[in-house]
Amino acid sequence: MSNSAVVEEVRVKEGEEEEEEEKRKRRKNEEDWQQEVRSEHTPGKILTTLDRTTTKPGDQAFQLAAAYVSDAQYARNIPFQTGENAIWCYHFYTKWVTKFPMYLFLILDLALALVESPAIPGLEWPFWASMLVELLCLVAFTGRLVHLGMFTERRVFWRDGKNICVVVAVIVTAIDMVVYLVLTVEGHWDIRWSRVLRPIFAINFSESRQLRRAFCNIRRTLLGILSVFILFLFSIATFSLLALKLFGNQHLTTHQGSPYFDNYLNALFDLYVLVTTANSPDIMMPAYNKNRWYSLFFIVYIVVNTYLFMSIFLAVVYNGYRKHLKNEVRTSVFNKRRSMACAFQVLCEPVDEDMVMSQSTWLKLVRVVAPTTSESHRMLLWQVSDEEHQGYIGKRVFTRLADLLNIEVVEQWRRPHPLENCAPRVYNSWLSCLVRHAVHHRFFRYFFDVVIFVNAIFIATDDTVLAIQKAEWVFLALYLVEILLKLYTYEPRAFFSLSNFWNWFDTLIVLIALIYTMVVHSSSHTTEILDFLFILRVLRLLRIVDTFHRLRVVMQTLINIGPTMVTFAALIMVFYYSFAILGMELFHGKVQFFPTPSTPEQQMCGNPLLVGSEFVQRQYCKNNFNDIVSASVLLVQLTVVNQWHVLASGFVITTDIAARLYFIVFHMIVVILIINIFIAFVLEAFILEYTLDKGKMESAIERKIQELGLGITTQELENKQEMLIENMEHSGNELGKSESDQSAGKCIMFKISEKRYRTVNALLQRMFEQDLADEPEDQVDAVPCRFTLDGVL
């Protein structure tokens, strides 16, 4: 058997073991859930399934079902009681009116670092003012927890780890504030050590579930790469010992005159820096100048540690993070199906010995869950659900409702052009049809793409030449003609719909150029604002991106994975914030920056210990930890890793050699772990979006909508009987171009938005759609749903 076959067999066995382990965990969770349900026979609370023969669904039933559907749609898994008051509290908890203030308080709590000592010069508040604001934030966090406890059972609340983390963080922060206040009033200096805990609030509140999921997956991935990381450190330690024995007794010096591999700790740090290539080839040159054969030591070291181990890190991180993320998504899909099953159980009705949901009940539920959707949109979703036109749907079909609501569907009215209503004979004449046909032709777009490209060449040349200034009027006239012809051809409201970004973009850029040109030629001087508006003309080059299919796919892919990238950006900012606060406490004031240094001490970054150091020679004085902004910029520079050892050396010289640990730990966590996870997720998401085959790989719901291309006429919408199925153009720019469609009268057209995903969880589920395709859906039937009968159900 070949090595590849053995590796493949081992990989298959490992995958089967992981699947079995995941199934065992799921069965245990189901048994725990069932045991919890059976044990909840408390006074005043009846846990039972609904008797549909004697009970009709009322408003409370729809509110309860809407809560379950909303949980499934937004991947929430917040346990709530099902009493009338509890349901109302839960709905209020998930509304923006309560969530938005929480975001503000979270941002405000983190932003206190800008005004707390050490603060940005000129922004420092008195300590009592910042502590008062922080106390207000703690009150808001406590109130949010109390609100959560109003609809969550007490023992379930205290078994939730994130609630315990928030409670502990609030108590610890309050104690630290009291201690700091007392010591400050007494004239003693103290450290606000609890500030580093502030990101805990941003991670553990329910509003940050995607951030918390990423954080938990990183924690699990860290355990998986521990063995590789230990081997990596062992390799560096071994090479450091070899370097000490090879070069330590040869009395070599570096280019700055310092000893070369004189002790083990310095050798260990220098070779760790070499893994990042930040000190290459400087670290090799003294030995290489001594004997060229010494270069083999560094070449072998770079191959083993920089290329081999770093590649293994990426592979292990990618494999581990993807595995844990898939398990998270699998659990999320299970919770979604369970929530939808509970919602169906609340509102289902018996028909021919089967439990089904009628059209009227389904439409009313969707109206409660998504009140902003139009009636035509709801009828479209029902048409997709009720494929057999029976007037009711079963449980299996109903569970797709959450996915239906997560699909970004753009609704547009197909209306006759206003000019056709005013002058139909002129608008439908042969000359008018010829003009509109020319606008629809692809060469019309090609022509103006060439115009944009030529205009860019003129912009890049010297604009003081009179001929070039005159040419600007020609280009501007052509752009105005293009927009007017499009407005003549396409219905204006469809042309300027919210989904047609490029139409808005083109019009705005042309209007800005027109205003600038008119102002400049009517005035003898310009302002910086006008110059900035004129520069915006260059952005019109981006319009060419929409012309080429591959470029458009890449751009749309970046837009689709944007929300998830925001999650990782927030995760990186959490680590930046914690390391920045820690660095400010450790290194504040050790390095100072003077814009115009006048004394020798100021030229040495305000610290005589830095005399003659490379840190001063490279003018790195502004890279310090004297405020949160400077610390964050420094951390960004450390993430880039170029010259990061020189940046670290300044704080090592001014403090102690142990300060290297701060910079090494930052590099390990942020650069090696977080950045590799970021790269892994971008690869996964980009490959999914970039290679998407709309005919084969899209989910059944999206494919169904695109295949049907539903268009609903106004008369049919009023009758709510049969739906008119028309071929729908996928591009929003094509709306209104078909004359046969225009003659059919006013109707509603739908299309799948290129954005596609309303939530990050929908993208994650799509990433693992193939892996989760074989997951059994009937397993949720074994999990009972909990209802409280308050005389309504």
Image (tube, rainbow, N blue to C red):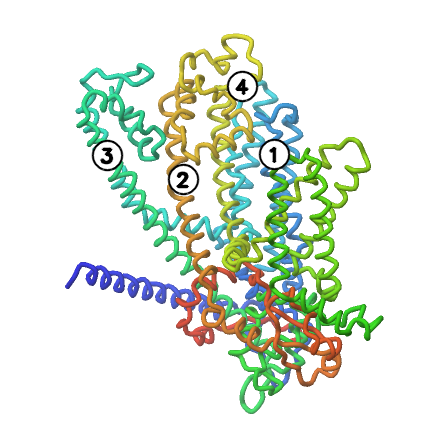
Q: CA distance from mark 4 to mark 2?
A: 27 Å
As drawn, 700 above or below 458: below
Task: Give the label, 1 or 2, closer to the camera.
Answer: 2
Q: What amino acid is found at the position of numbered circle 1 in the picture?
A: Leu
Q: Residue at x 29, y 25 (%)?
A: 283
Query: Residue 528 placed where, x, y %?
Result: 71, 33
As shown in the figure, which amino acid type bears the numbered disc 3? Ile
In terms of depth relative to the viewer, which is nearer, 722 or 40? 722
Real-space Cα distance between discs 3 and 2? 23 Å
The mark closer to the camera, 1 or 4, is: 4
In primary-sequence order, the first of circles 3 and 2 is: 3
Helix, strand or loop for disc 4: loop
Identify the image quadrant of the C terminus.
bottom right
Seen from the viewer's position, the closer of residues 433 and 195 is 433
What is the spatial separation of the Cα atoms under label 3 and label 4, in whole angstroms? Answer: 39 Å
Amino acid at the residue labelled 4: Phe
The residue shown at (70%, 77%) is 741
Number of other residues with Cα within 10 Å of mark 2, as a class: few under 14, some 14 to 19, many 20 or more? some
Please give the residue where the numbered disc 2 appears in the rendered image: 671
Q: Residue furthest bottom?
A: 352
Q: Earlier in the sequence, mark 1 or mark 4?
A: 1
Residue at 52% x, 12% y is: 602
- The picture places residue 366, in percent across and down from the top left corner, at 65, 72
Ranked by sequence position, the earlier of labels 1 and 2 is: 1
Q: Earlier in the sequence, mark 4 or mark 2?
A: 4
Return the residue at label 1: 112
> Circle 3 sits on which residue?
299
Direction front: furthest residue: 467
- Cα distance, mark 1 to mark 4? 23 Å
The answer to whether residue 439 is left or right of residue 231 is right
Which numbered dot is residue 593? 4
**Does residue 27 appear in the picture of this structure?**
yes
